[in-house]
Amino acid sequence: MAADENNLADRSGRLFESQKGYDPRVVLFYLIIAALLIVLISGLAYQQLFNAELHAERESSQNQRRILIPGPRGNIYDRNGQLLVGNRPRFAVILYLDELRAKFRAEFIRIRKNYRAADDKDIPTADQLWTLARVSVVQSYLEQINAIIGRDLKVDSVRLNTHFSRELLLPYPLVEDLAPAEYARLLEHLPVVSPLQLYTTNTREYPFGSAASQTLGYVGINEDVEAENFPGEKLRTFKQRGSIGRDGLESKFDSLLQGEAGGAIFRVDPLGYRLRDAKPIESRLPTQGQNLVTSLDIDLQLAAEAAIGDQTGAAVAIDIKTGEILALASKPDYDLRKFAPRLGHADAADITAREAWTNLAIGGAFPPGSTFKILTSIAGLRRGVLDPTQAIADCQGVIRIGNRDFVCDNRRGHHGEVLLPEAIAHSCDIYFFGAGRLITPDVLAEEGRRFHLHERTGIELPHETGRMVIPDPAYKEKVIGEKWFPGDTANMSIGQGYVLVTPLEMACFAASVARNEVFTQPTLLHNPDAPVQHTESIGLTASQRAALVEGMVGTTTYGTANTLNLDLFKIPGVRIAGKTGTAQKKVTKEGKTGNINYAWFICFAPADNPEIAMAVMIEGETLGENFGGGRYAAPVAGSVLKKYFEKKNRPADQKLAPFKIE
Amino acid sequence: MPKRFDQARPFLTLGFVVAAWLVVPTVFKTFTRASFFELTAPVGVAASYARDLQEYWTLRLHSNSELIEAGRDLARLNASYDLAVQQNIEMQGEIARLEGILRLPSYTGYRSEHARVVRRDFSGWWQRLTIRKGKNYNLTVGAPVVFSGGVVGRVSEVFAYTATVDLISSQTVRLAAVVEGDTRPISYQGGLNPTFGSAGGVIEFVPLDIFASANATKRLVTSGLGGVFPPGLTIGSVIKVEPSTDGLFKSGEVKLDDRLAALTEVTVLLPLDTP
């Protein structure tokens, strides 16, 4: 054997090399290998120990997807628990595209085979074939639905492709807004386990249509739904569209009404399809937002809107003690039901054309006309320049102030020497021109500011105008750049000239006068335990106040608003203290320039123990038309007051049980 | 070594069969399964006939006086049924008149096919019955099945002489239901029922103004809107409803009729346009 080995060694020269000792070249090789191994191990250790989180994150972002589903918004109720804005379910049939991978592939192969079999030269590209396959498969599912509910629906390939590429994990809505009968048929005919499923989304529901539309507001689409405290913020996320408040209370209290989004995290394959039968790694159900209980009384709101009818104007009713708004009507308005699920272009154009977007009760500033005379009276009484027992002017229908004649627009006659109560009741301009001259514009403006008529009320609504003006000589000089004239004082004393207020401000003013205080903070939120508001006293003596109230009651009994004395508006046992106003404003309509009238009425009732205050403003349509507050605005207030006392005096057994919100 | 091999042989054989079953074509599997049911059906049917015969002889053993008494009770029952039938005819006439006035579409007419229950399967996996009629009586898949207490389920498979009925306690059955006195359709589906427990189901999409509890149950009936079941058939009693988190609906639980577990005869309703 050893001999053989020697022979072999001899034949090959050197079959085996034996290495004894350490060859420097081998040592170097070992060192290089060792260095490489150290680098490799260090790299691995670094990646594993220090970058583990990063890799885990990358792994998650590659094979996990997150779905967010918005929560339904909270409901909005009136003060008696009547639902003003709720949610209406929308039944839909949806298809989970991510469960159809095998079907898409089979259809792709079938279509391609058909093209090849037909020897078609214009064979579509692979992308086109995939699109065809997807449309074909989805249409086959849609045919099942068509057969069950008797429709003839076709797949929108563009929408399908967009959904497939961007929102694969979200259900694809095949049919939306199913009728109850269709939903019932599908319940019984669709297999329980299928990529086709019945699904509910929701949209806003408005049981009262256009009632309080600008106050309640509307919602728009929210593409950016967020889910607080739901993991996976860095994962690729598919979001279902939610809603966001765009106007009114929906906008102001959006964060309260907004529901909490739910969601789920799924594992997906490299192509983004959900793993078959995979349960979500994380899931959370969406929850409804909080409910909002407003101070509105829907019965009064409807009464106010019905009374305004097709006219342009606003009416505000306010609880004197708490400042809670009972009705906030503005016309023209819009039907909120047209916003659910979304407003069409034609309807939006129609609202714009009718100028119905603006809530005139808070968004429009108008000259208050003779309703301002109550402020003039208070200013004069407080400063001692007016005495209820003394006449300050002799109304002969016209008076010259500066170099201009000012006429008494009311009663078209001569009031003669009248005292304050009669001057208020008959709205004698000559009396108040005289009063204004005695009071002086600065004092009158100061009184207006004392009643906060120069600033926003701060009601919980967006878009409250800031264009209200209580002018004084400094204002005119600064804004108009002109000197203040005695005629300006005359105009201001009867609520004309530069004076601008909102109907809401005048309602708050009426409530403040009723409470014998200078400010009423309005609110649209109902609090059953709300305390009575208290601010600074107006500062009238008992006799001065009695004269003021006597004049206001006279307005509704024998004065400019004696329409409220008609049987139609008469409320047994209730005296109404009010004041009419008719303001003019120069406008240009259809190329013609002229005066347009604003009919006003402010009031509170009962006069002796006030509970409710109101302000109504109706805008005249025709240039130069006599559009008096007693004739056009007072009846609106009369209707609302009648409804208020009718509800209040309703026997207990006819009252609805108070609504409880859990 | 051979001895150990002998010991493992049954397992190897089983493994081989399982492996073979996995690779055989689907057509063969389907054929085998269908054949199995068709071949075993006569056994079940024969057993059912034997049970009927047994019951017959049990009845034969009763004394004459017992039979006379039972006959008298039966005659009374028949008389009351006759009266109910008369009332039903009158009521149907009134309904037809009102439907005519309101121009309502008429509901689908049904042909009744009564069938004896051959076998009952209740487990956590499925809840179903096998009945003694099949293609020989033109039964169709999906046909509604009822009994005197209301809904039984739907036909899920039809064989030559037998058919399988999925009970409403099965998770595979879903109906469009209404709470008695209401018109809004809600979804009823069989629940996850234990083998020996009482059967139940779940309801979803229940309007928020519907209330029910174990002490104040509400009767759940078929809506008739789904196009499968005629309206007004009892499904069960709603024993619990609670609001879902989204605030849009409530969901709840339904207790089904205990007699579902002891049915001996059911009626399959076949739409009249079915051949």
Image: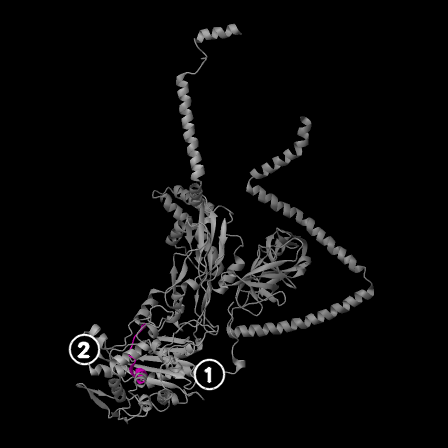
Image position, residue A276 (x, y; %): 50, 46
Chain letter for the residue marked with disc 1 in the picture: A
Q: Is residue A495 visible?
A: yes
Residue B38, numbered label:
none
Q: Secondary structure at mark 1?
A: helix
Chain letter for the residue marked with disc 2 in the picture: A
| 10 Å crowding of disc 2: few (<14), some (14-19), many (20+) | few
Q: Residue at image x 66%, y 46%?
A: B39
Image position, residue B24 (x, y; %): 57, 38
Image position, residue B223 (x, y; %): 55, 65
User: Which stretch is magenta?
Assistant: A363-377
Residue A286 higher or lower than A645, as above or below: above
Q: Which residue is mark 1?
A: A646
Q: Which residue is mark 2?
A: A483
Q: Is residue A99 visible?
A: no
> Toward the viewer: A473 or A32?
A473
Q: Residue at image x 21%, y 83%?
A: A487
Q: Which amino acid, mark 1?
A: Glu
